């Protein structure tokens, strides 16, 4: 398994009382999978993704990414593994406003020492996602759909094994949503494993697995009554 999650839980305190945002979740994702996780707002989807991406320490449980126990590593080692093996697209617009589109895409390359042609790779990705002509623009000059493409290109910069996206089409119109999902399908066909959290049922035709998150627990299948 490329990503293997076992007994994963995250506990928070609210007004002196404990509640489980994620409660004993098991999930295995193989190389080449395209997995959609659906569920209502507050069901624990984003918390699960943030732990899977190495951004949030779980209360209990384990996450193995490409055979490595993620939270057995030190913070710097987790960052290095994420930079090398995992692409992450956050909820909302996470570009750096002072950098051009081109430099936003190139940025992950320079976070670790590596060899290669960063500019060539960034140019290829911008062409791949259909916004090569916007390379010299700033994020403030782009539409929501264009910004989403920048984030996708940036997440792919270091050729990750798995691409994790948190509500990647939540603020887009129907036409742009379909364009982005078709782009994800093409990326997946080219060999990148994809894990997406969404609440939009129209996007579920893209992918080979659907799981439902409800009250912090994950179950296989699309349980529409829980949405």
Image: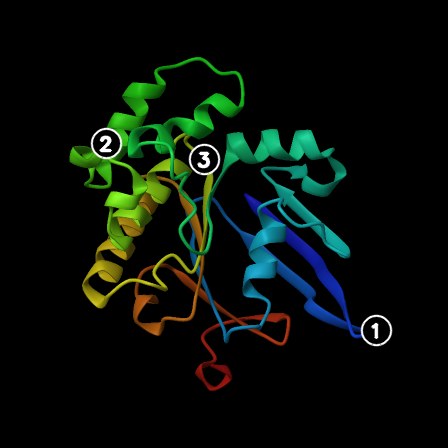
The foreground one among 176 and 147 is: 147
Q: Earlier in the sequence, mark 2 or mark 3?
A: 2
Around disc 2, counting alpha carbons within 10 Å, would you say few (fewer than 14), some (14 to 19), or many (20 or more)? Answer: some
Q: Where is residue 193 in the image (x, y as percent from the top left)?
A: 43, 45
Residue lying farthest to the bottom in this orientation: 225
The foreground one among 226 and 148 is: 148
Residue identifier under label 1: 16
Instruction: For mark 1, give the secondary structure.
Output: loop
Residue at point 38%, 27% (across, down): 106
Q: In this view, does 109 lie to the left or right of 143?
A: right
Query: Can you see residue 80?
Result: yes
Instruction: For mark 2, give the secondary structure.
Output: loop
2 vs 3, front mark: 2
Query: Can you see residue 1?
Result: no
**5 shown above or below 129:** below
Cα distance in 3D space between marks 1 and 3:
40 Å
Q: Where is residue 226 in the image (x, y as percent from the top left)?
A: 51, 83
Cα distance in 3D space between marks 1 and 2:
49 Å
Residue at point 28%, 62% (across, down): 172
Residues tagged 2 and 3 counted as in contact (Cβ below 8 A): no
Residue identifier under label 3: 160
Q: In this view, does 35 lie to the left or right of 62?
A: left
**Residue 135: which disc?**
2
**107 shown above or below 66:** above
Quarter of the view holding residue 213: bottom right
């Amino acid at each position: 398994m490329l990503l293997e999650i076992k007994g994963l839980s995250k506990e928070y305190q609210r007004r002196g009382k404990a509640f489980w945002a994620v409660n004993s979740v098991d999930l295995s994702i193989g190389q080449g999978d395209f997995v959609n996780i659906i569920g209502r707002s507050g069901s624990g989807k984003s918390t699960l993704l943030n732990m899977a991406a190495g951004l949030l320490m779980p209360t209990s449980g384990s996450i193995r990414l490409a055979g490595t126990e993620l939270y057995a590593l030190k913070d710097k080692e987790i960052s290095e593994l994420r930079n090398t093996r995992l692409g992450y697209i956050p909820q909302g617009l996470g570009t750096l406003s002072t950098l051009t589109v081109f430099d936003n895409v190139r940025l992950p390359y320079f976070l670790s020492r590596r060899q290669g042609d960063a500019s060539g790779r960034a140019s290829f990705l911008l062409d791949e996602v259909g916004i090569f002509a916007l390379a010299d623009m700033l994020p403030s000059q782009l539409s929501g759909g264009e910004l989403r493409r920048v984030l996708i290109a940036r997440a792919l910069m270091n050729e990750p094994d798995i691409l994790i996206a948190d509500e990647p089409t939540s603020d887009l119109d129907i036409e742009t949503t379909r364009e982005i999902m078709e782009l994800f399908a093409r990326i997946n066909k080219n060999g990148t494993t994809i894990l997406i959290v969404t609440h939009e049922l129209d996007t579920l035709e893209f992918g080979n697995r659907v799981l439902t998150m409800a009250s912090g627990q994950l179950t296989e299948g699309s349980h529409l009554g829980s949405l």
